[in-house]
Image (tube, helix red, strand yellow):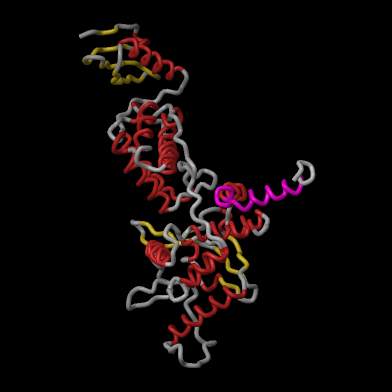
Amino acid sequence: MAHDKRDHGDGGIDERGKDRWRLRYRVGGKRFTKTFRGSIGDARKELRRLLKSGEDNQHVAPSRITLAEWVRQWIALLERRGPDSEDTPRRKRGLVNARTLERYEELLRLHAVPTLGARPLQQIRPTEIDTLYTTLEQRLSPRTVHHLHVVLGACLNAAVRKELIIHNPVARAEAPSLGDSDAGTVLDQEQLAALVQGFRNSTLFPIVSVAAFTGARRNEILALRWSDLDISNKTLTIRRALEQTKKHGRGTKEPKTARGTRIIAIDDGLIALLVQVHEKHLRIKAGVPESDTVDLSLVRLPPDALMFPSPAGDDFSFTRFRNPYAVTKEFGRKARGLGFPKLRFHDLRGTHETLLLDAGVPVHVVAARCGHDPAVLLRSYAKRTKKADMSAAAVIGALSKGVLGG
């Protein structure tokens, strides 16, 4: 068996098979060994790198921990550290809620671990990450692959901080393209009116109305309480959002972004609709049929009573959350029946924003109303509307009239 003998401080290399070597070296008086695959020249280069890393105080002790094992540790770390964690892709706010963490785990478990899970962290190369992305792009959307890139990068950044690896291979891989985001379906004013009217006999009518005329997200609406409605000032306050996870079930969390906590001005028509829903709840609480004329002023709902609680079950509760996925499914089914086959519930938010911007409402006002970053809103709006370009053409046409012979 071949040996590459060196001075004591230079380490040594032992052959362990074809293109397989054991590297022996010391750092700080401690002995280390590392298995290496490649040519003898590459093995010598790797040994020199290890020795130099010791001299530069950047040495990372060899570890056999695999990607799959580290993913489990990283997720457990985030669960333990909760909202104060720094080891997440959402470093700007430092937040990671339960549903988001569940999504991180799902992305890594389904799309990274099957291919690279058995690989030791220290042996994963950027080219392997590139190959993973190329393979996934054949069956997943660009947005999903890009999201995996961000999460995997955060996961391995944490491994660098824990001194399990020296460099993050994701940082040296080719970042996948985000692609063109789906702008969704945007309704014009007449279509929106027809859609909302089409839900009038549905239990989703007030929920759809709030979404259409406030631009609030589905889970923000399903977390609304009656205490969030200010009838005298005609406002609706968004303070929380519904969150559903496999581990914890349904609960609430802070809005999606820092801008998410906001006060929305609402019109008389929406006020009247919500007052009707509130009165219906009071009647349920008092056990009074809708046909009876009674004074409901003394009836009180629970302080945390929801505007749109779950209607399911015989033991009705004013504080039981609706199933958000059931709402989405029922909305899609009803919308298809009304002639909107591709419409998603979230498209009501995009429609609300687009109609306001097309009407000339300043972007910062729309952004504040919908809890958006103005720059992000403008990028999304540019993909959704044609009216803005037509308006620009009309302005240019007026300027050029008489100059170009028009």
Residue closer to the observer: 390 or 93: 390
What percent of the width, then of the height, locates residue 134?
A: 37, 33
Q: Quadrant of residue 235?
A: bottom right
What percent of the width, then of the height, locates residue 188?
A: 56, 61
Is there any visible trace of residue 250 in the rendered image?
no
Residue closer to the observer: 170 or 94: 170
- Kindly report the secondary structure that dominates the magenta region of the rendered protein: helix
Q: Is residue 160 above or below residue 89?
A: above
Residue closer to the observer: 386 or 308: 386
Residue at position x 57%, y 64% from top? 189
The quarter in which the N terminus is drawn is top left
Q: Is residue 219 above or below residue 299?
A: above
* Left or right of residue 127, residue 254 in this image: right
Residue 393 located within the stretch drawn in magenta: yes
Residue at position x 45%, y 88% from top? 290
Residue at position x 43%, y 41% from top? 142
Q: Quadrant of residue 267?
A: bottom right
Q: Is residue 58 above or below residue 385?
A: above
Residue at position x 43%, y 67% from top? 338
Q: Which residues are magenta?
A: 381-400
Residue 177 located within the stretch drawn in magenta: no
* Left or right of residue 375, residue 42 in this image: left
Q: Is residue 322 above or below residue 117?
A: below
What percent of the width, then of the height, locates residue 234?
A: 63, 72
